[in-house]
Image (cartoon, helix red, strand yellow):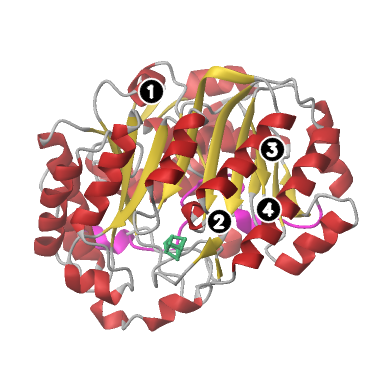
Amino acid sequence: MANIDFEKFSKYSKAGPRYTSYPTALEFSDAFEYGEYIQYLENSTEQISLYVHLPFCRSACYFCGCNVVFTSKEEKLSAYITYLKKEIDILATHIDTSREVIQFHFGGGTPTYYKAFELDEIVTYIKSKFKNWSDKAEISCEIDPRFFNEEQMKVFAKHGFNRISFGVQDLDEKVQKEIHRVQPLELTKNAVDLARKYGISSINTDFIYGLPYQTLETFKKTLELSTQLNPDRVAVFNYAHVPWLMKTQRKFDETTLPSPEIKLEIFQYTIDFFERNGYKMVGMDHFAKPNDELFTAIKKGELHRNFQGYTTKGGANLIGIGLTSIGEGSHYYAQNTKNMKAYEASLDAGKLPFERGVNLSDDDFLRKAVIMELMANFSIDMPRISQTHNIIFEEYFADALEELQEFIEAGLVSINDGKISVSTTGTLLIRNIAMPFDAYMHQHVKSKKTFSKTV
Ligand code: SF4
């Protein structure tokens, strides 16, 4: 990667979406009604991707941006299983359950806060309703190594789990203390070894840069140590500091957060580090070994981005199950309520706990295709988009192309033979480069309390 003038570069640091969806969650509202959601569920014919949200955690990691319920009460966890089953029952009345399941993901919270027999109970129940699982289904779980044992792993093996994502974040002791997540390398290593012992072929580790007390030097050490885990994929996320949304983030002394310049330096080093160590960059924050299916997907133009990051299963209909979970169809997003009482009340009344969402307009649908292509492949094939969507790209996106000029002049973007391409250095600013194509951005530019910083 070219040498970067970090000071100059940091001027691009501004609030911007991560584009795990388009339109972003800020546009979700109750204008998208329950009946419309049900119609989508009933009429969809695509393969199915199931996401099950298990929201409970024992204690707060202060950086966390997830929707979490902190508890030590076992009865809360078991009551939630009862409600998950009710939700699955109702979903099964609206979905053709003979459709093929090609992806299943347990997210949280801490899914492995549940005991082995409870995890077994949940997966078994889902399988009793959705019976047609592809042999090639990607079956995965997010795991906090501090809550993971062999009994749970046996359940995952029994149900054919083949991908596990371990939260690591940082391996520096001081940083770990500050973020309230003390997790020695040895503990993570044991968890990874356990998963490998039971045949998990794809191990992912998650890291975060931008946390308190991180410096280029501390993060270099973290990366060096992380090689002991030998992950197949690595995600290195930019910490999203949104204290107006997440109370626990207010515990951080903001003066200890690394500056945009340092963050850029850390991420540039991270990219070089993984390339030196046999990985290739995928999308804006993932790295994988060159034989990973993600690269085949890039070549075929089939790499997609969704709420779980980058995926090769983009054409599937994502069904969100559980508190706060988000579902996605080609023309809609639907989110469940974030409130446990409301979640239970809906299900007791025989209704899905759907709260809000968005029905994509033709313009949303087109912009989603453009933004997701940019986020996944770092390029846009203008003639192909024009043909698929029956538009003249240069005319439809004249404003966006004008806004891109700034990046073209800086050498971060180029346009040749109808293709918009982002340079390797430009990938550090991919969120900024996608923003001109976002029709909703101008509504949010004045408000400071929307998105996290892009840099
Ligand atoms: S990072 Fe994971 S374990 Fe920590 S509070 Fe958030 S969801 Fe829970």
> Tag 4, which secondary structure?
helix
- Where 258 falls versus 328 (above or below)? below
Determine which of the numbered discs, if any, sits on residue 441 in the image: 2
| Residue at the disc numbered 3 | 125
Distance between the alpha carbons at the discs numbered 3 and 4: 10 Å
Query: For the residue marked with disc 2, what is the amino acid?
Result: Met
Q: Is residue 423 magenta?
A: no
Q: Residue sitting at 12 percent across and 63 percent down?
A: 218
Alpha carbon of mark 3 to alpha carbon of mark 1: how far? 35 Å
Residue 381: image location, x then y, percent: 45, 23
Magenta stretch mostly in which secondary structure? loop
Residue marked by disc 4: 81
Give the residue at x 20% y 43%.
229
Nearer the N terminus, badge 3 or badge 1? Answer: 3
The CA distance from mark 4 to mark 1 is 38 Å
Query: What range is drawn magenta here?
Result: 9-31
Nearest the viewer among 247 and 401 is: 247
Element type where label 1 sits in the image? helix
* In this rendering, the label closer to the viewer, 3 or 1: 3
Q: Residues within 10 Å of mark 4 (few under 14, many from 20)?
A: some
Q: Rounded to the nearest whole Å, what is the CA distance between mark 2 and mark 4?
A: 39 Å
Q: Nearer the viewer, mark 2 or mark 4?
A: 4
> How far apart are the two marked residues, 3 and 2, measured between alpha carbons?
42 Å
